[in-house]
Amino acid sequence: MTVFLTGGAGFIGSHTALVLLEAGHDVVVYDNLSNASRESLNRVEQLTGQRIEFIAGDIRDGQHLDRVFAERDIDAVVHFAGLKAVGESTEQPLAYYDNNVAGTLSLCNAMDRADIRTLVFSSSATVYAESREMPLSEQAPTGRPTNPYGSSKLMIEWLLADLQQADPRWSIALLRYFNPVGAHESGRIGEDPQGRPNNLLPFISQVAVGRLPELAVYGSDYPTRDGTGIRDYIHVMDLAAGHLAALKAIEGTNGLHTWNLGTGQGYSVLEMIQAFEQAADRDIAYRLVERRPGDVAECWADASRAARDLGWRAERGLEEIMRDAWRWQSQNPNGFRG
Ligand code: NAD
Ligand code: UD1
């Protein structure tokens, strides 16, 4: 299969490109490099010994997509491209709706014109309504997201569901990621946030290498086992394997499927700090502070539908997550910049 990855130079896209190449597929990456560097793909090529076709472009540029699709034989699209910083989305909602929602619309129109109708979309557990009932299955109600980033993900899910209903030739997978973390076991590719990290594990990693002085733990009075927030952290290589499984499952079929990609196991912030300290053999300075607005106490997946339908489950545990995250961060203290 030839798979077209929008946003394929980014964190999850680059790991998925590697897994697809290793499974014998051809990979075309389309990315505007607004939050990634070409170096991630150079390294995937070094690791696999295979070539990736890279095209610099923006998913909002429909005419460019038309030319790109006309010149190649694309079988399926995995759509990672978009903006993902929750805080920034509240300050720049138009940029988020433009890149994420209008970008997806432009992509789907171009796919339709080119007769490509197999699509895997990067959604998020953020679409679920706040709930006291854990774990979250795909049947759990979706909510009113607390920020434009989350709203954009839910709007795209609706758009894709409407599209598939109107034209049953489409085959679409909505993959709801829980918290993607970790890095490829080589330490050559990993998450490389620009500026101050928003997410927990990149923040801990940067404290560990001395780029940041200490971690602020957002809230210690949640109704959880140690008072800190609980999440379902999934190794990015397991997540990448989930994309391969989803592509295999939907190829040559019609329909819309929603799958949670999580581990089914939650860990608290303090448990994450402790596990990282063990893997890196160093202390992480942290301070307990106020809750972060918009955070929920706990969130973890019921991952049984993906296990049943795709034969996929997350295989890597917390120790491997921390070991690989630390290998990436310690070998590349400044990410792809060295
Ligand atoms: P990332 O920022 O590393 O990757 C996104 C890529 O898309 C980047 O390479 C960026 O340059 C590119 N891009 C952005 N706008 C574009 C546009 N208009 N045209 C072309 N390329 C564009 O993020 P990631 O962590 O790899 O996330 C991938 C996808 O998964 C995103 O859609 C994100 O919302 C979703 N997701 C991520 C997480 C997470 O915690 N990382 C969780 C849930 C869902
Ligand atoms: C966040 C986003 C969510 C998005 C997901 C993946 C918010 C409110 N939610 O989820 O929409 O889909 O990232 O990109 O931003 N924590 C700290 N200190 C920190 C950072 C985080 O204590 O410096 C805590 C948080 O309070 C939370 C846990 O660590 O309990 C995980 O946080 P984070 O990595 O930001 O992910 P989520 O909040 O789950």
Image: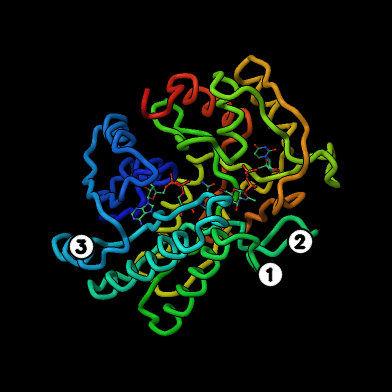
Residue bearing mark 3 = 64
Task: Establish whether ligand 1 lies closer than 8 Å to the Cβ of label 3.
Answer: no
Q: What colour-coding does the image apply?
A: rainbow
Check the image and name the residue furthest to the front: 91
For the C terminus, the image quarter is top left
Q: Is residue 19 visible?
A: no
Callout 1 environment at 10 Å: few (<14), some (14 to 19), or many (20+)?
A: few
Q: Position of residue 306 (x, y in %)?
A: 56, 57
Q: Is residue 192 visible?
A: yes
What residue is rendered at 69% in x and 64% in y?
129
**C-alpha span from label 2 to label 3:** 42 Å
Q: Which mark is residue 131?
A: 2
Q: Does residue 9 sit above or below 106 in this rendering?
A: above
What residue is rendered at 56% in x and 62% in y?
148
Query: What's the amino acid at mark 1?
Result: Pro
Check the image and name the residue furthest to the left: 71
When asked about the image quadrant of residue 280, the answer is top right
Q: Are marks 2 and 1 in contact (CB under 8 Å)?
A: yes
Q: Sequence-wise, which precedes: disc 2 or disc 3?
A: 3
Indicate the secondary structure of the residue bearing disc 1: loop
Q: Sequence-wise, which precedes: disc 2 or disc 1?
A: 2
Q: Position of residue 111 (x, y in %)?
A: 29, 69
**C-alpha span from label 2 to label 1:** 9 Å
Indicate the secondary structure of the residue bearing disc 2: loop
What residue is rendered at 75% in x and 32% in y?
270
Q: Which mark is residue 5?
A: none
Q: Position of residue 21 (x, y in %)?
A: 30, 43
Q: Are marks 1 and 3 in contact (CB under 8 Å)?
A: no
When asked about the image quadrant of residue 75, the answer is bottom left
Q: Does residue 280 sit above or below 322 in this rendering?
A: above
**C-alpha span from label 1 to label 3:** 37 Å
Residue bearing mark 1 = 141
